[in-house]
Image: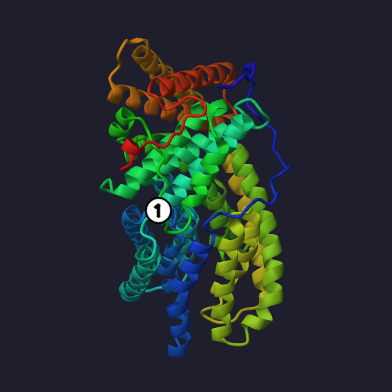
Amino acid sequence: MSSVTPAPASPPARRLPLAGVLRVGRPSDIWFKPALSVVAAIAPPGLALPALGRLDLAMYTMAGSLCALYAHNRPYAARAGALAWVVLGMLGGLAVALVAASLTGSAVVLVTVGALLAAAQKVLCDATRVGPPGNVVLTFVSSASLFAPQTLAHVPGHLALAAATGAWAWLVCMAPALVRPHGPERRATAAALKAAAAYAGTGGTGEGHARARAAGYAAVQAAWQALLSTGARSRTRRALERLVVRAEVALAAPTEADAGRLRAWAGALRGTGPVPQAGLPRAAADELLGVDAARGLWARLGPLTPLAVRTALGCALAGYASLALGVGRPYWALVTAASLYQANIALTWSRAVQRVVGNVVGVLVFAAVAPLAHLGQAALVLCCLAFSFGAELLISRNYWLGSVCVTPMALLITEFAGYQNPGELITERVVDTVVGALVGFVAAVAVTNRRAGDRVERALTAADRARERAARLLAGRDPDAAALEAARRGLAVALAELRATADAAAGEWWQRALPQERVVLAEQSGHRTLAATARRQGLLPDRGTDTETEDARP
């Protein structure tokens, strides 16, 4: 329950923040997984090609190998399908790019094709929630291929190389399942417990409690999605479900939560040891069926229309501007623009600053490393491997730090077909970065997203209805246990969606004032109802009562 005083409705934010944009944070808990996977995926074909005297083909093998960056936060059952779709998506974009490059030499046409591909890749990655690195890698592969010398006769062979290395990347990413088959869902559950403990530490009213609560519900939703994608409800999954419920209850009633126990449970999920047994009342345990908060793909595509238009327009204009300046690689400007677009204008601005700073520092790193990379083709490949590892090590701390490694790696990839003048590469990269960032951001501002306010209204309505449903059940003398559990979970989902929608809309420009007061009031009443529902279910034990019951074990 929050005691925040409702804030009056405020006009749209128009400030462009600078403070904190370049602040370095904590690394991702699993940064080493994509880092090691992409190195393992790139190294065999990358080192074999120089031995065969065909390093010029490395661009196509890299296309498949870079798929190893995806889906590391997903359980292996879901990861298998997600990675397969990533590989197919990469091959689709690559095929369109190679065919276009073989049919026309018009740079304007090629930039247009690249912009349309970038918009499609952005929307599909966001709608399917594929996760980092999102559309940027796919757009880099297809855009770079548009400007590579190509003939129709060579397209099948190049696609076959990408498909083979994509299959190898799939195997690399699935291999850890042999050692720790439940690792991803254990980590997701641990993250939910830690986030709930952080919110419980604020007592629901302390400094930063609103942000901690939003982070907690986001972590809980991510944990449920991970558990729901594992297939059959095994003994391990049932034990993890009970822990996620405990995290949900702590978020609903932070003053009654034991933050120390939550952290202890999270710590026990490391490694492959037994999952802690968090007991629940028999009725609640019997009705634990999870939550399906995911909407259909088509339902998520509609709200992404402004983002698609921004991406297509921004990428096209950035590429055309680069051509007008006489830069030989307009796809760099196109990819820069494609990398900017986030959920709202404020986040897009922050990404633009991070991209420019990271790329400028990155070209300086390239200038220092170029003499070493030019010692031989094997040295060139090894430098690319080092930068691919460094990018994953740093990018979760802040995007600009990752760009410091991504930029020299991208510049080195252009030299697979032959060494080039470092000074020329550096100049063109800096020009394209600045052009892509400026033009891309202007396009984002020009394409308004007036539907953001409407989505807040719909989220408010959904949250109010979910709260009313739970309140009606609470008012009954003996509510059905399954209905009460479904109502509690539905209300938790609705409140999480409301906060995410309100935060996204707050960073948009050119829209009517948002109903901030109604959002805060809906959250306050919703969380009070959540606490009451959890108490009615017996999920909030009396103080001093042991929460571990023998009959609740899976």
Q: Secondary structure at mark 1?
A: loop
The answer to whether residue 426 is visible is: yes
Q: Residue at x 30, y 35 (%)?
A: 289
Res 442 seen here:
no
Residue at the location (63% across, 49% down)?
352
- How packed mark 1 is, by other alpha carbons closer than 10 Å (few <14, some 14-19, many 20 or more), is few
**Vertical placement of 386 versus 430: above or below?**
below
Q: How is the image coloured?
A: rainbow
In front here: 311 or 553?
A: 553
Circle count: 1
Question: In x, y percent, where is residue 413?
Answer: 54, 73
Q: Is residue 18 above or below residue 268?
A: above
Q: With 222 as the anchor, is 267 left or right in this view?
A: right
- Residue at (52, 50) in percent of width and height: 267
Is 482 displayed left or right of 548 in the figure?
Answer: left
The furthest residue to the right: 19
Residues 188 and 436: in front is 188
Quadrant where the C terminus is found in the figure: top left
Left/right of residue 149 with respect to residue 232 in the rendered view: right
Image height of 527 relative to 425, above or below: above
User: Residue 391: horizontal and vertical position, in percent?
Assistant: 58, 63
Q: Quadrant of the N terminus?
A: top right
In front of the other: 370 or 105:
370
Left or right: 344 in relation to 85: right
- Residue found 53% across the figure and 40% down from its top: 261
Residue type at tag 1 = Pro
User: Residue 397 location in percent, x, y?
Assistant: 63, 54
Name the residue beneath numbered marker 1.
Answer: 274
Give the image location of residue 339, x and y in percent. Answer: 55, 52
Q: Quadrant of residue 152?
A: bottom left
- Please name whichever residue, 6 or 457, is drawn nearer the observer in this view of the structure: 6
